[in-house]
Image (cartoon, grey):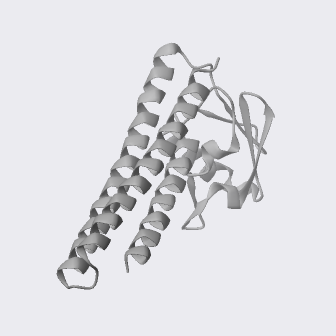
Amino acid sequence: MVQDALDDAKERMQAAIRVLKDALTGVRTGRAAPSLVDRIDVEYYGVPTPLQQIAGISVPEPRVLAIRPFDQSSLKEIERAIFASDLGLTPSNDGKVIRLILPMLTEDRRRDLIKVSGARVEDARIAVRNIRRDVLNDLRDFEKEKMITEDDLSRGQKKVQELTDSIINEMNEIGKRKEEEIMQV
């Protein structure tokens, strides 16, 4: 019973780490990466479609993203979606390829991006603490219903806290790496 709750908590906390990593890939650094546009959905024949499904994305230069639509008629829709995104980039269109030129980040912009990444790490930590709370409540309920002993409850609480601490430490490391990547000139 306790082990099942711990396994569930571990699985949910690992999912929170995956969500954090996905969220941080969308935070722009000084280099171009196709992951910057992963979250952009394009209105394609009336259906919101992920950009990578309707266009090839490449990095011809360190600060340039080239987006080559598979269907040239979707060029304008892709441009609209990029404008509507929170990237803050202006696409340039030559009729076949959309280029996104990433400007050099200023010191102020880098600090803003660090705040954004820090907020995403904090959101992930909150999610993990909520998972911990839920699992601890489940363990207390098991003990009240005499499904586990008081000793099992105590051991389970200790293991949940150890798991939470290790996951939060891993999230902090991910956040530090992202900060270093942002501050890299």
What residue is drawn where x is 47% and y is 64%? 10
Query: Could you tell me residue 103's position as x and y percent?
Result: 62, 22
Q: Is residue 144 left or right of residue 11?
A: left
Front position in the image: 7 or 17 = 7
Residue 98, image quadrant: top right
Query: Could you tell me residue 18's position as x and y percent?
Result: 54, 55
What residue is drawn where x is 61% and y is 46%? 37
Name the quarter where the N terminus is drawn. bottom left
Name the quarter where the C terminus is drawn. top right
Front position in the image: 164 or 15 = 164
What residue is drawn where x is 56% and y is 33%? 178
What residue is drawn where x is 39% and y is 73%? 5
Query: Could you tell me residue 153's position as x and y percent?
Result: 28, 70
Query: Could you tell me residue 51's position as x and y percent?
Result: 64, 55
Whether residue 5 is visible to the viewer of this picture, yes or no, is: yes
Q: Residue furthest top?
A: 107
Q: Is residue 51 left or right of residue 69?
A: left
Residue 50, image quadrant: bottom right
Front position in the image: 75 or 176 = 176
Whether residue 85 is visible to the viewer of this picture, yes or no, is: no
